[in-house]
Image: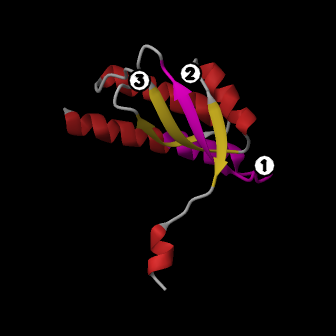
């Protein structure tokens, strides 16, 4: 059951990405920047680790796709009251638009660059 759930989640994510690619194939290229989005959840962030949680996350991904926003990864504090999320998006405004449609808070958005330690060790 768990294996099927993960396979379904991967397949749905793949379909959403391919749909976004197909829609944007003939449009002007947009430069995607990377952002750190800080959020506060006073009551705690509680996404169940089951099919309901999968539906919640897929809904977020779908709305993000409509705003040309890609959720890369999130870090959640131990008390689940703060999240630090990595996104790729054309602008902070696109992230705010997607967050509003997803009913998720945004405390702060910081444009970031990736620093890979392996870049320095492979010389």
Q: CA distance from mark 2 to mark 1?
A: 29 Å
**Is 22 contained in the magenta span?**
yes
Quadrant containing the N terminus is top left
Q: Position of residue 5 (x, y in %)?
A: 28, 34
Q: Position of residue 80 (x, y in %)?
A: 38, 25
- Crowding at mark 2 (Cα within 10 Å: few <14, some 14-19, many 20+): few
Q: Which SS class for mark 2?
A: loop
Residue designated by label 3: 55
* Residue 54 located left or right of residue 102: left
Residue designated by label 1: 27
Between label 3 and label 1, give the one nearer the viewer. 3
Q: Residue at x 39, y 32 (%)?
A: 77
Q: CA distance from mark 3 to mark 2?
A: 16 Å
Q: Earlier in the sequence, mark 3 or mark 2?
A: 3
Residue range of the region highlighted in magenta in the rendering: 15-41
Q: Residue at x 65, y 21 (%)?
A: 100
Q: CA distance from mark 3 to mark 1?
A: 30 Å
- Crowding at mark 3 (Cα within 10 Å: few <14, some 14-19, many 20+): few
User: Where 92 falls versus 50 (above or below)?
Assistant: below
- Crowding at mark 1 (Cα within 10 Å: few <14, some 14-19, many 20+): few
Q: Residue furthest top?
A: 43
For the residue pair 20 and 81, the one nearer the viewer reads as 81
**Is 5 contained in the magenta span?**
no
Between label 3 and label 2, give the one nearer the viewer. 2
Q: Residue furthest right?
A: 28
Q: Earlier in the sequence, mark 2 or mark 1?
A: 1
Q: Earlier in the sequence, mark 3 or mark 1?
A: 1
Q: Residue at x 37, y 20 (%)?
A: 46
Q: Which SS class for mark 1?
A: loop
Residue designated by label 2: 104
For the residue pair 119 and 72, the one nearer the viewer reads as 119
């Amino acid at each position: 059951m768990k294996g099927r759930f993960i396979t379904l989640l991967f397949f749905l994510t793949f379909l959403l990405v391919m749909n976004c690619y197909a829609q944007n194939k003939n449009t002007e290229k947009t430069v995607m920047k990377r952002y750190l989005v800080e959020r506060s959840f006073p009551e705690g962030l509680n996404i169940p680790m089951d099919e309901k949680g999968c539906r919640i996350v897929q809904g977020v991904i779908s709305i993000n796709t409509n705003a040309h926003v890609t959720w890369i990864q999130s870090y959640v504090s131990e008390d689940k009251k703060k999240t630090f999320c990595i996104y790729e998006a054309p602008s902070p405004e696109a992230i705010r638009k997607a967050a509003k449609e997803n009913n998720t808070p945004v405390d702060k958005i910081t444009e970031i660059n990736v620093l890979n330690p392996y870049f320095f060790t492979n010389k």
